[in-house]
Structure formats: structure tokens, C-alpha cells
Image (cartoon, rainbow, N blue to C red):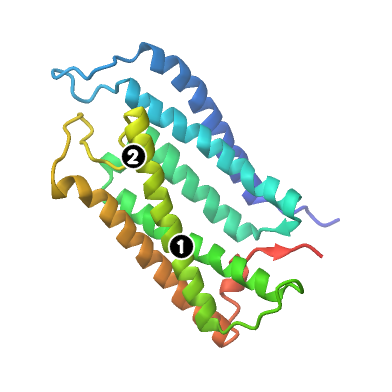
Amino acid sequence: MKKSKINWQKILSYFVIITLVSTIVFLVFAINKAPTVADPNQPFIRVKSDYALMLSQCILGVVAMLLPGMLEHKLRIEIPSNMLILYTIFLYSAIYLGEVKSFYYNISNWDNILHTFSGAMIGALGFSIVTLLNKTEEVPMNLSPLFVALFSFCFAVTLGVVWEFYEFTFDGLLGLNMQKFALENGTQLIGRAALTDTMIDLFVDAVGALIISIIGYISLKYNKGWIEKLQVRVRK
């Protein structure tokens, strides 16, 4: 009898979901005990707004983890295991390690690395969307690899901008610090320094999108099969 193959993607997904759910439970209790305003004598003690940010991110993380399965069932699509693994690692790195474990503050360029990675991943998703449309009978098109690559680049950069809109909005509504306009001790940055995080995020989003767009163009133009390993497919 053949041994059943270990599904690392499912194991990784369960691990991340359990981690996020247990963190949510902890944060619900921690937010009630946290001070409202930072104590100048204890600048690194987390306050309610810090826990509110972590709680909102973890809740969104759980929803994001469940989203691919719901989309596969609803839209009858198949998301490659490789893409799901990258997606899961990204969510864990951004939400749990980045926010809960303070990697954004303690690890140099952690945010930049993740934004570059997300730009590339969303760019790969852009290839999936345009090629799915290109191959359906309802939308008869014959698009060149250059157009597909350009669409994917623009798609990824646009979603990067939308994400910054989201961060800016909820920073204002909930008093969060997703755009890192303040230091971990609560000191607010001013002028160009306050804009640096947002602009660098957009820049590295574009870099990641450009890299995957070039790879995707070469893959489609010369039938390399690289980008196809990350592409979403319609179930037959």
C-alpha cells in the first residue's frame, strides 16, 4: 500500500488558524486590563489601542485564512497548493510575527520585505484573473503576454494603494498605528518622516509586482511554465 502524502499546506493552515484564534482569546482579556494612555516612565508598555490593532488584525487574519476555501467552493476554482502555502506564510508573518510579536519594530526592514512579497503574490493573482478571463468562452479575447504582464503589474500596484487607504482610514477611526506614523513608545513622527512608511510600502509593492510581472511575461512568452504553478484554475 502506498503511504498517503502529507498535506503540508493543510497542516500549515491549521497551525496558523489555531495560533490566531488563541491570540484573539488572549487579546480579549488583555485589552481590558491595558492602560488607555502610555506611561512616560514605561514607554514600551502596550496600551488599549495597541491591543485593538492586534485584535482587529488577528480577526481579519482568521477571515483571510478561511477565504480561499470559501472562494474555491463558491466560484468552483482551484487554488494551487504552492500559492496557498505562500499566502499562509505571508499572513502569519504579517499578522502574528509582525504585529503581535512586534517584528515590524524589532526586525529591520520586516515591513518592506512583506510588502515586496505581497506585491509579487498579488501580481501572480493578477495573471490568474486575466488568463481566466482570456480562456473563458464568455469573454473571447486573445491577449499578448506583454498585456497580461502589464495588467498584473497595475492590478498589484492598485491593490497596494487600496491597502494604504484601509490603513489610513482605520488609523484615524480607531487610533491605530498601521501606517507607522508613530514610534512604538507613542512618539508621533512629523513631516516627511511620517510619510516614509507609506511611500516605501507603495514603492516596494511596485518592485515586487514588477519582478513577478517580468517573470510572468517570460514564462508566457517562451512557455516556461513558471507562472502557471501559481495560477488559479477553473475546476472542470
Mark 2 = which residue? 178
Q: Pick out the residue farthest to the right.
A: 1
The image shows residue 143, relative to residue 23, as above or below, that is below
Quadrant occupied by the N terminus:
bottom right
* Picture quadrant of residue 202: bottom left
The 10 Å Cα crowd at callout 1, few under 14, some 14 to 19, many 20 or more, is: many
Q: As drawn, is 77 to the left or to the right of 12?
A: right
The answer to which of marks 2 and 1 sits earlier in the sequence is 1
Q: Residue at x 13, y 17 (%)?
A: 41
Q: Which residue is mark 1?
A: 156
Q: Amino acid at mark 2?
A: Met
Question: Where residue 92 sits in the image (x, y, percent)?
Answer: 48, 43
Q: Does residue 73 appear left or right of residue 120 in this picture?
A: right
Image marks 2 and 1: residues in contact by CB distance under 8 Å: no
Seen from the viewer's position, the closer of residues 92 and 144 is 144
Q: Quadrant of the C terminus?
A: bottom right
Left or right: where 107 falls relative to 213: left
120 versus 27 height, above or below = below
Mark 2 and mark 1: Cα distance apart in space = 20 Å
Task: Look at 65% across and 46% down and name the residue there.
Answer: 10
Q: Position of residue 118 (x, y in %)?
A: 44, 56
Q: Establish if 199 lies above or below 138.
A: above
Secondary structure at badge 1 equals helix
